[in-house]
Each structure stands twice: as C-alpha cells, then as structure tokens.
Amino acid sequence: MPAEIGSNILNDNTEKLTSAITSLPQLLERKRLLDAHTSIATAILKQIKDRKLDTFFELETKLMSRAALERGVLDILLDPEMGVPEDKMRFFLIYYLMGQVEMSKVSLHFIQILSFEELWKLDFNCRVNWTSLPQHLKARVVI
C-alpha cells in the first residue's frame, strides 16, 4: 500500500512537471508581453508626470467651464516647471478661445514665454506683429 501511494505521488508530480515544461513557452511569451505593456505604461506615466499633463488637464477643464484658477495664466505659462512649450501653447490657446484675452496680446505673450526657436518649430510666428515687440526681444529677432 505505501508503495502504491509513493508511486501515485511520483506519477502525479511527473505529470505536473511535464505540464509545466510544456506550457513554459506560452508562459514566457505572456511574461514578455506583460513586460512590454508594463514598460509602455511606465513610460506614459513618466511623460504625464514630467509634463504635468494632469495639472494642465485640470486647468484646461476649469478654463472651459469658466471656473476661477488658483494662479494667473501668465504665472502658469512662465513657470519653468510647468510642462513643455506645446502644452503651454495648448493651454494658452484654450484660454484665448474662451474669450479671455485680446488677439493683439496673444503673439506678444508667446514671444515672451517661448524662445524664438520654439516659435519657429511650432509654426506660430507667421502672425506675429514684430513692431509691437519690446526692444529687448527685437534684438533677438533675425529676419
């Protein structure tokens, strides 16, 4: 009787080991896919944090619902810790489209906030009124 029990346990363990070895390639592929998706999710989360997209989302939502902001728009745009120029431009354009600022001020604010290289890259400079620039900014313009 004890020999039968030992034989059954050995057969059961052998079957489990064979099953595990057979399913190993599938498990490794699932692990590879899970690792890839985890890396992508981690990279996206890093971008959200680095660019402060969650903060911009809240601010843009407040602008669209015409709720008061805790900080001034210009303070947000001038804050070097607040995202990248593209995010600041999107935020400012929402601010502008919500009727919060005159068109004549749009170009001037962006020229003061963004570098000229960024303006060229964003192709926003085509409507800049160069004559209204402050003197210290005119000195940087090469036409």
Image (cartoon, helix red, strand yellow):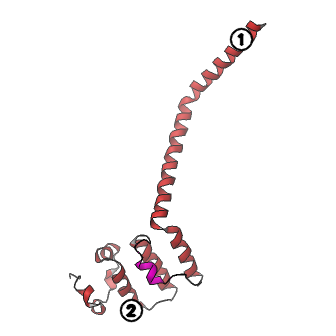
The image's mark for residue 56 is: none
Q: Mark 1: few, some, or many residues within 10 Å (few <14, many ≥20)?
A: few
Image coordinates of residue 72 in percent, x first then y, are 49, 84
Task: Look at 53% across and 39% down and name the residue there.
Answer: 31
Judging by the rendered image, the residue that carries numbered circle 1 is 6
Boundaries of the magenta span: 71-80
In what quadrant of the picture does the C terminus appear?
bottom left
As displayed, is residue 121 above or below residue 95? above
Does residue 102 appear left or right of residue 129 in this picture?
right
Residue 46 image point, x, y percent: 47, 59
Residue type beneath disc 2: Ser
Q: Main secondary structure of the magenta part?
A: helix
Looking at the rendered structure, the secondary structure element under dot 2 is: helix
Tell me the element at label 1.
helix
Residue 104 tag number:
2
Of callouts 1 and 2, which one flags the residue occurring earlier in the amino acid sequence?
1
Q: Position of residue 81 (x, y in %)?
A: 42, 71
